[in-house]
Amino acid sequence: MEHNIVITGTFLDEITTDIPSNNWGPEEWDRDFASMREMGIKRVFMIRAGFNRFLAYPSRFIPQKRKTYPVHQDFIRLFLQLAEKHGMEFWPGNYVGHNTRGEYFNDLDFDKTVADEIWEHYGQRSPAFGGWYFSKEIGRCEARETEIFLKLASHCKKISGNKPIMVSPYISLLPDVPRNAGGHIPEWMEPPMDFSLFREEWDKLFRSLAGGVDILAFQDGYIPYLYFGEICRIMKELGEKHGIKVWMNCESFDRDKPFRFPPINWNTMRCKLESAAEAGIREAITFEYSHFMSPYSLWPSAGHLRKRYMEWKNQPEQPVGLP
Amino acid sequence: MEHNIVITGTFLDEITTDIPSNNWGPEEWDRDFASMREMGIKRVFMIRAGFNRFLAYPSRFIPQKRKTYPVHQDFIRLFLQLAEKHGMEFWPGNYVGHNTRGEYFNDLDFDKTVADEIWEHYGQRSPAFGGWYFSKEIGRCEARETEIFLKLASHCKKISGNKPIMVSPYISLLPDVPRNAGGHIPEWMEPPMDFSLFREEWDKLFRSLAGGVDILAFQDGYIPYLYFGEICRIMKELGEKHGIKVWMNCESFDRDKPFRFPPINWNTMRCKLESAAEAGIREAITFEYSHFMSPYSLWPSAGHLRKRYMEWKNQPEQPVGLP
Amino acid sequence: MEHNIVITGTFLDEITTDIPSNNWGPEEWDRDFASMREMGIKRVFMIRAGFNRFLAYPSRFIPQKRKTYPVHQDFIRLFLQLAEKHGMEFWPGNYVGHNTRGEYFNDLDFDKTVADEIWEHYGQRSPAFGGWYFSKEIGRCEARETEIFLKLASHCKKISGNKPIMVSPYISLLPDVPRNAGGHIPEWMEPPMDFSLFREEWDKLFRSLAGGVDILAFQDGYIPYLYFGEICRIMKELGEKHGIKVWMNCESFDRDKPFRFPPINWNTMRCKLESAAEAGIREAITFEYSHFMSPYSLWPSAGHLRKRYMEWKNQPEQPVGLP
């Protein structure tokens, strides 16, 4: 028996902000791509092409506009080469940065030029270039942001012969459930929720992305398990209504431990996957394989998470009951 | 020369609250039990049979009373089988949860029914069933709690042909010594302590548990080293007075580092063990082997802690002096 | 092509305060020294000879003055033996502790007696004894402290036949740039800095150490990258002016992640090394090899940091540009 949902993609995180580096070179990344492929991953998404002063590739454009650090490793080139070698797709992210007021800056022309640079120097030359991931994370329907998304999507599709666009929003509009380090959520902290406002707002968001965005992989990290099924069902329904494919971005790290972040408990990941599958979602990507599911991770428990996932993926489910 | 104290037991933590999961399956747990046995561990204590929505076994009763997550792994069954295989005793814990006011809930009938379920489906069928661990942690003599302990103890003994009961209280009534992340306790923070109030309160607690509880393994984690010897002596003395066996619950994780929790420094663990041995305590259990002493742990330094412990256990002590 | 800067030394941290122990014994330390030597390390500096109640060697003097824990491992002896075996120099640190008001205590006679003890029992007998590291960390020119440094330096040189003295101050007088866990510093948080006050204060500090201190290895951990080059140039210039050799204490751990502390990202370390090299600094030490660069570390990513460093050290630099 096959499960109805599988993990087919992972983010790649090398413009590290809050995840400690594995300090891998090309050889270690090659080994990791091989192990991803073997687990069933066919698409890799670069979390960002740059973050404030850190750049993931030797851009000529960005350093003219923003102060940046020297670039010693061209991750876009490396990841594209490895994607080709292992028969996978590579999707680059955008540059993300703060403006002088400390807010995320929005600049359509800037984003377009970065896309041009990536397409010209990498995308058009590689059969592994799969599409565009838009790194900015949204969770509400804010006109200014979704407008930029649509215009940028249109530009990216034009230059790339219509390659698809993916976004990965966070789930907003939930009751304020504290996720304290070190504890699980007791039941009294998950009050019954009225999903009508939620559905209404997300309907607007889907509508405002339709025609530009092809895939929406919602982040599952902040969804209390009590609401999980219903939220997956709403996402799936709205995706069908607006012609956007819905995937689950299934976090493989644990937000509920006293330190941030170890690999997640397999049991929790399995609950999330099965809950999404029941709602009709068929594809998951994860943030992210190399730290939280890889046998080569900084965290030795990551490889065991992968092992548990593979057992579940390959074996018929066995019901567990009292002996 | 043999040391006067040895580690003969460990907790098992798979209803993880604040410890990240090793993500082990039956094969990895088997390997770990073998390595515990080889270190001298003959008893394993399950930290909890359930915690809020998480269950360690596929209870039929608990989900009728509390919202719980699906159970994919029957840890009581697995741990009992491995205990049998490796010639060890298994002691289950209770279910621990919060009520709607966010307090730990106390319900004697609930606890009794869980004990019945565990005895009927696991305990009575397995020669490895060693006794009952009561998961609720107390540190003061509160009548309502100790009364429930006594009644539950009486029930558990009745159904199981008098299997013994263990509790593991935390040490209360110490001066308020801050345990700041990242630092050790400077001497000026450990003021001289008057132990008479301490002895009086613990005398009451031991008395209120006598006749029901057979073993008290006090948690050593919050005891400043300055008071360690005296507290061990008081525990030992009160245990003899009230007919309760006293063990040390020697924590193998470090509370004093900036992140919670790495394996403890061997030197600290050795100081604690030797201090307890001097006070006449002969047996220690630890919280817990699989994350903090196992060569297979998430933390690579855990295996080295085990190695240091084994050297100390097997070799005559060599005095260290200036060359 | 050779790089102009190399890592020739590391601290040794076994009086652990905020770094979790690797729990190594003599065999594991031997293996680690071999791997240090192979990376090019020729000097090891003990971070402290004692910290509050913890002692790194079985001092007879210190326990007469301060409450201390039993000593089970003589790290000065072990580290000296391993330094001899592997052809390296060993430099001991001092005892560091708090007084009853919670301040670091300063006591010249105490420090002298500890130095005497270390010289008599270890230093004079070992060809590997390289010099003295003064563990107290300063960052401003405070007369009381620098005076003690000078007097202690004079004493240590007298008893040891003029062995050199190293200090490792932190960089003070920077604009208050928050180093939030989990984020990088956006550009608007690094305001332009006027270095004249900085130069003036450090000129005083260098002057007050001249004649006693031989090497000043400044900590690079809190220096925003924007100021890195200029601060290295000022350090180098002041060192030449006052006859003190200037090294960089290049931290190999990351201060900017949500938990403290994983190994640093190689890219950041390389930026720091190259920036110092450009300013004319030729030698670096690191805090510290065994947790953050060793293949045997608690952190599996440490060995990869070492690998990246070795590649950089051994290979001609290849410019990275757009393909």
Image: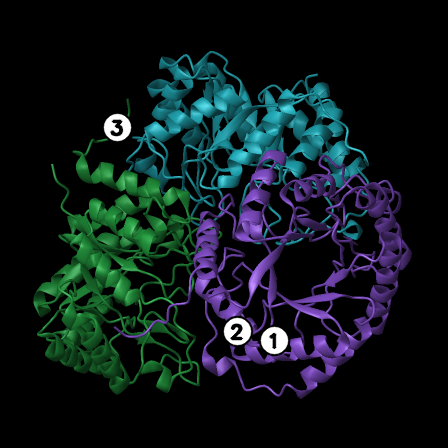
Chain colours: A green, B cyan, C purple
Q: Is residue B69 visible?
A: no
Q: In the figure, A273 relative to C283: above or below?
A: above
Rounded to the nearest angstrom, the CA distance separating label 2 from label 3 is: 62 Å
Q: Quadrant of residue C155?
A: bottom right
User: Residue A232 location, x and y as percent?
Assistant: 20, 57
Rounded to the nearest angstrom, the CA distance separating label 2 from label 1 is: 8 Å
Please tell me whether mark 1 sits on a helix, a strand or a loop.
Answer: helix
Q: Earlier in the sequence, mark 2 or mark 1?
A: 1
Mark 3 sits on what residue?
A321
Disc 1 crowd, CA 10 A, few/some/many (<14, 14-19, 20+)? many
Rounded to the nearest angstrom, the CA distance separating label 3 from label 1 is: 66 Å
In this view, the residue in front, B22 or A12, is A12
Q: Are marks 2 and 1 in contact (CB under 8 Å)?
A: yes
Do discs 2 and 3 belong to a common subunit? no
Q: Mark 2 or mark 3: which is in front? A: 2
In this view, the residue in front, B252 or B208, is B252
- For the C terminus of chain C, the image quarter is bottom left
- Subunit under mark 1: C
Q: Quadrant of residue A60?
A: bottom left
Residue at left offset 10%, top offset 75%? A211
Mark 1 sits on what residue?
C232
Q: Mark 3 or mark 1: which is in front? A: 1
- Residue type at mark 3: give it: Gly
Q: In the figure, B96 relative to B91: above or below?
A: below
Q: Are marks 2 and 3 in contact (CB under 8 Å)?
A: no
Please tell me whether mark 3 sits on a helix, a strand or a loop.
Answer: loop
Q: Is residue A11 left or right of residue B20?
A: left
Mark 2 sits on what residue?
C275
In this view, the residue in front, A14 or C168, is C168
Disc 3 crowd, CA 10 A, few/some/many (<14, 14-19, 20+)? few
Disc 2 crowd, CA 10 A, few/some/many (<14, 14-19, 20+)? some
User: Residue A288 location, x and y as percent?
Assistant: 31, 55
